[in-house]
Image: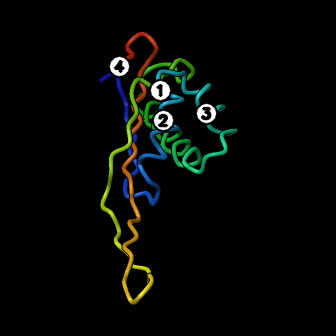
Amino acid sequence: MSQVRATAKFLRISPTKVRLVLDTIRGDRAGDALNRLKFMPQAAARVVEKVLKSAVANAEDREVGDVDQLVISSCWADQGPTLKRFRPRAQGRAGRILKRTSHITVVVAPDGKAAG
């Protein structure tokens, strides 16, 4: 098995916001992506950084290849369950607040076997 993945589930951040960060690192080397994530202002960058570090650690544990040559072959954010909350609105009505969650998956592979 040449690809290794790491997943974080039920994170309290919208998948739309996470996808913006994932789109910037897709296809990069793992080291370069970690550097870029460290300096991104988005809150989702911290979460994606943890998942990427986990994927690299998984690859190192399974001895897939040289850790310095790992490439992010694919990454995605799926929608998790939505928490429904209500806030008071005008004239006795209730406004619905949707608190979205996400499942983030990052797949790393050695440089020669990166599959998009």
Q: Give the crowd class for mark 4: few <14, some 14-19, many >=20 residues within 10 Å.
A: few
Alpha-carbon distance for marks 4 and 2? 14 Å
Task: Name the mark on residue 34.
Answer: 3
Compared with 97, 66 (above or below) is above
Residue 89: image quadrant is bottom left
Tell me which numbered mark, 2 or 3, is placed earlier along the sequence.
Answer: 2
Alpha-carbon distance for marks 4 and 3? 19 Å
Helix, strand or loop status at disc 3: helix
Alpha-carbon distance for marks 1 and 3? 12 Å
Report if the CB atoms under discs 1 and 3 are less than 8 Å apart. no
Q: Which residue is mark 2?
A: 22
Image-based side of 41 in relation to 97, left or right: right
Tell me which numbered mark, 4 or 1, is placed earlier along the sequence.
Answer: 1
Compared with 59, 46 (above or below) is below
Q: Give the crowd class for mark 3: few <14, some 14-19, many >=20 residues within 10 Å.
A: some
Query: Which residue is depicted at the point 41% across and 65% down?
Result: 99
Task: Name the mark on residue 26.
Answer: 1
Tell me which numbered mark, 4 or 2, is placed earlier along the sequence.
Answer: 2
Alpha-carbon distance for marks 1 and 2? 6 Å
Of 86 and 29, nearer the camera is 86
Q: Which residue is mark 4?
A: 116
Of 2 and 115, nearer the camera is 115
Query: Which residue is depicted at the point 47% across and 56% down?
Result: 13
Tag 3: amino acid: Leu
Report if the CB atoms under discs 1 and 2 are less than 8 Å apart. yes
